Amino acid sequence: MNTKQLIRILFFMVLITLALTKGYNKGHNNLKHSNNRKDIKKHEEIHEDEPVNAGDDNEEGNEDSDPEQNNEDEGAEVAEDNDNNSEDDDDINIDEAIENESDGEQRKMILEDEDIKPIINDCDAIKTFLGAEKESSINECVFNDKGQIISLYFNDIDLTDEDIEKIYSYNTITTLKIHWTGKQYTINQAASLPYIDYLSIFNSLGGALNLSALNSFEKINTLEIGAPSTKHVYVKSGSFKEFQTVKTLILKQFHFSQVIIDEVGTLENIEEIKCESCGFSTGLNYEAFKNLSKLRTLHFTSYNKFGSPLKEIPISFTEILSLKTLILTRQKITEIPEQLSHLVNLEVFYFSGNIEGRILTNDSLIKCSYDNTGSLCKTKEMDCLGDEKLMINFCDSE
């Protein structure tokens, strides 16, 4: 082997080494480099198999016309082109790698965001503040399209003063329902809510409620007070006087005393009084009810064991000319007073517990119902009776 052949072999080996090094470092286009190495290897084997001519020394003087030299140059150009293509491919692959890495980071961020529950409304904010141990204290929470609380029902048994302050810091609440367990702080702090129009307090312990701190409520329309069926509830003297804007008063398991009757009689804007399972002290005077000139509905259903039922319809009820609905069921009233016929606006009259008497004949009546129809009589046909019409006989003529 002469010097020229040795140089040629070394040159191709350098090219192969460079190609292998680039392929190893950049990790791309391995297949393309492999094909190039195979072509170069094949080209080298062809030249090694050729016989060595004595005229090789003359070929040194005319290298430009040497086919092998031309092949050598072509091989170098091919290698150079491959290197350039490899570099271009490397640039493209680097861009793709950056893009894939960016996409991966975005997917990772999305997954991480899915694990985080964002606070999007005030109800979630309260529950987050209370934590897992206390969030069950929130029985019901309603928010508007802005995420602001408008209705809240909670139980204060496990709540601290700090918790109560946090709850009342959401001053967009208009409906507030409290399952009360005896903490006066819960009632007093409710006065900080400026937009309350519906307030419900369920006294789980029974007994007295002190509502005097709520004298700042200027927009309240509905007041509801109740207790469990095994207990009764009442309000301390002076409490009802604070609710002059109330239009609807709902009382459950409530006990009426003379003081309460007189205070209710001062609620000049009252339109509806509903009493369910309420008890009454004996000998009550209902004269104060005559002042309720806007009263439309008076509803007494059943009574509780902590007081007496109604045993008669108070005459003062017959003087509330604004009455449209009078419901007196499951009491122990023994007689229907004729004065009820003075209620010219009365449209609905439901009555049970009668022993005897004449039914009402008010022309304004649309609906009327009596339980003990066998002991009642009618002086004229009344369409308000419906199916009971045939069950009630005409009164005997005197």
Image: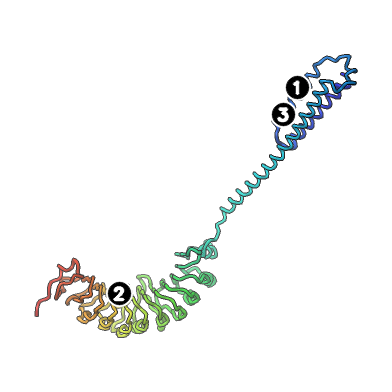
Residue tagged by mark 2? Answer: 299
Where does the N terminus fall, quadrant-wise?
top right
Q: Amino acid at mark 2?
A: His
Report x, y in % for residue 116.
57, 56
Q: Position of residue 317 (x, y in %)?
A: 27, 81
* Figure quadrant of the C terminus: bottom left
How far apart marks 2 and 3 lie (CA) works out to: 97 Å
Q: Is residue 237 left or right of residue 314?
A: right
Answer few, some or many: residues within 10 Å of disc 3's Cα (few below 14, many 20 plus, some between 14 and 19).
some
State how the image is colored: rainbow
Q: Is residue 160 left or right of residue 86?
A: left
| Residue 366, numbered label | none
Where disc 3 sits, the SS reads: helix
Judged from the image, the secondary structure of the residue bearing numbered disc 2 is strand
Of mark 2 and mark 1, the one earlier in the sequence is 1
C-beta proximity under 8 Å, tags 2 and 1: no
Residue 134 in sight from this viewpoint: no
On the rendered structure, is 347 left or right of 169?
left
Disc nearer the start of the sequence (1/3)? 3
Which residue carries the number 1 mark? 42
